[in-house]
Image: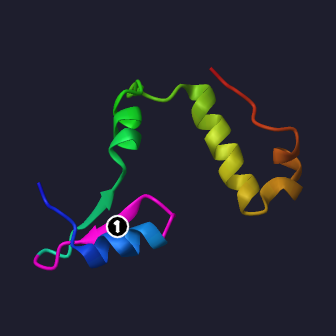
């Protein structure tokens, strides 16, 4: 286990925007530091790794188009049309 230096602990206490990031100076890999209780909460959540349904894919495509300003296009104004 790695122990924070006193300066690092003070810096983290002053910055309440968890999760904090740490960079490995040798590899430049970035790591995320979470309070243990938050990690355990997240680790206990059930993860759904099944593939997306056709409806979910259409909804995501609709939202992506809307976020870049396509909502004014006539063919998209009615919302996503689900085809099976």
In which quadrant is the C terminus drawn? top right
Question: Predominant secondary structure in magenta?
Answer: loop
**Front one among 56 and 41:** 41
Q: Which residue is mark 1?
A: 21
37 w.r.t. 2: above or below: above
Q: Position of residue 16 (x, y in %)?
A: 51, 64
* Foreground pick, 83 / 60: 60
Is 41 situated above or below 14? Answer: above
Above or below, 17 relative to 56: below
> In the shown orientation, is residue 31 left or right of residue 10?
left
On the image, the x and y values in percent for residue 73 come to 85, 55
Q: Nearer the viewer, residue 65 or 20?
A: 20
Quarter holding residue 49: top left
Q: Position of residue 1 (x, y in %)?
A: 11, 54
Give the residue displayed 47% in from the left and 72% down from the top.
14
Look at the image and give the residue range highlighted in magenta: 15-26
Residue 17 covered by magenta stretch: yes
Along the horizontal axis of the image, is 1 left or right of 15? Answer: left
């Amino acid at each position: 286990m790695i122990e924070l230096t006193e300066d690092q602990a003070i810096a983290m206490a002053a910055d309440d925007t968890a999760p904090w990031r740490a960079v490995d100076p040798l590899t430049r890999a970035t790591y995320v530091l979470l309070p243990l209780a938050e990690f355990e909460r997240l680790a206990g959540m059930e993860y759904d790794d099944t593939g997306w349904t056709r409806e979910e894919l259409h909804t995501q495509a609709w939202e992506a188009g809307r976020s870049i300003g396509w909502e004014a296009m006539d063919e998209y104004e009615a919302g996503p049309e689900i085809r099976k």
